[in-house]
Image (cartoon, rainbow, N blue to C red):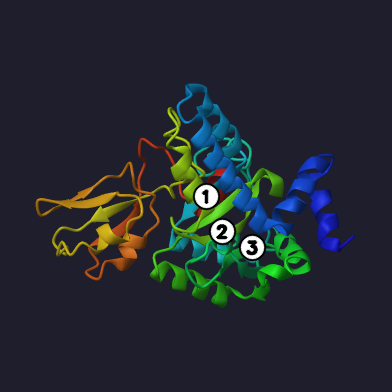
Amino acid sequence: MKESTKRVFKLHGWRVDRAIHNYIYFIFYDIYVKAALYATKAIVVLFSRVEATKYIPGFIFDRYHAKVLSRGDINKILDLEETVMLGPDTTNRIVPFKHANKIILREPTHLAVMDCPCKKELKDPCQPLASCIAIGRPVVDFWMEHCDKYNVRRIDREEALDIIDQHRKSGHINQAFFKVATGGSMGVLCNCCPKCCVSMRATAMAQKIKGAQDISQYVPSGYTVEHDTAKCELCGTCVESCHFGAIEIVGGIRVYHPEKCYGCELCVEKCSEGALSLVYKETDRGLIPLDIDLAREILG
């Protein structure tokens, strides 16, 4: 048995079922995400008119989630030089998930990138394929020992940021993924878009089920966007860059829907006039950004 495999079983302790799940999850990453998407499709097609079915995707989604990150949040994560172990998040404000709710980054200077299994499932995916980034030695070592078919390789902080910025320029958002099978904690940072990301696609399908509109596999960053009307030229770039319909121009007026905003920061980066800024404010939604400094203060 390879060393990284032994560490997986040690991580899960007596929950051998979760260790096996962890192993299968990464070994058959592309097959796993494809099966998850097809399972969601089946639920929608077969049971979309049954009220009780809203509990089925809830059960599934309680075990697999993502948190949208701002570019600043990413910087702080990649600046880490020591192990960070926070949570579980009993406040449900940073990582508001029932089962996968811990921020654990063991030896976070270890980084690796590999081809996105979501993209590999498509005939015409966004490029480049290399867009899934592992953070922390346990995940990185496992990928390096088991995931050759995904073209995995080690990278440093600078290359990780280059990959992230390249994807953000082409309209990808960043998500930190949390999964029960991987210890209920984060460790994978992905560059995602609605076309390729199975999490985003599955969420869109699941929300078609009657009574399941609030179910999602990913949650907002916790930030909102402020608008400087004096600088804005109503060019519409922010509207085009938003994947969530949070911004529109109606009758020559920019309209912002904070309840739809995921705080991904793409509109801020795309605004050539500097009319937009990302801010954290207490809102009715109650979510807090995955800012490492703030997380340490709340969950420490």
Alpha carbons under labels 1 and 3: distance apart: 19 Å
Which residue is drawn at the image coordinates 75% and 65% (left, top)?
141
Of the numbered discs 2 and 1, the one sitting upstream in the chain is 2
Where residue 160 sits, quadrant-wise, is bottom right
Towards the viewer: 33 or 239 = 33
Task: Read off the residue under disc 3.
Answer: 135
Q: Please state which of residues 66 and 243 is positioned toward the viewer in this rendering.
A: 243
Which residue is tagged 1?
199
Give, as a three-letter code, the residue at label 1.
Answer: Ser
- Decide if residue 8 is on the left or right side of residue 55: right
Indicate the secondary structure of the residue bearing disc 1.
helix
Q: Amino acid at mark 2?
A: Cys
Q: Is residue 164 above or below residue 117?
A: below
In the rendered structure, the answer to whether residue 40 lies left or right of residue 86 reads left
Question: Is the residue 126 above or below the residue 180 in the image?
Answer: below
Please name the residue that numbered disc 2 is placed on. 118
Q: Position of residue 243 (x, y in %)?
A: 36, 54
Foreground label between 1 and 3: 1
Disc 2 to disc 1, C-alpha distance: 9 Å
Work out how far the residue at label 3 is from the one at label 2, CA to CA, in angstroms: 19 Å
Local packing at callout 2 (Cα closer than 10 Å; few below 14, some 14-19, many 20+) is many
SS of the residue at dot 2? helix
Position of residue 99 measured from the top left corner of the image (x, y, whole percent): 63, 37
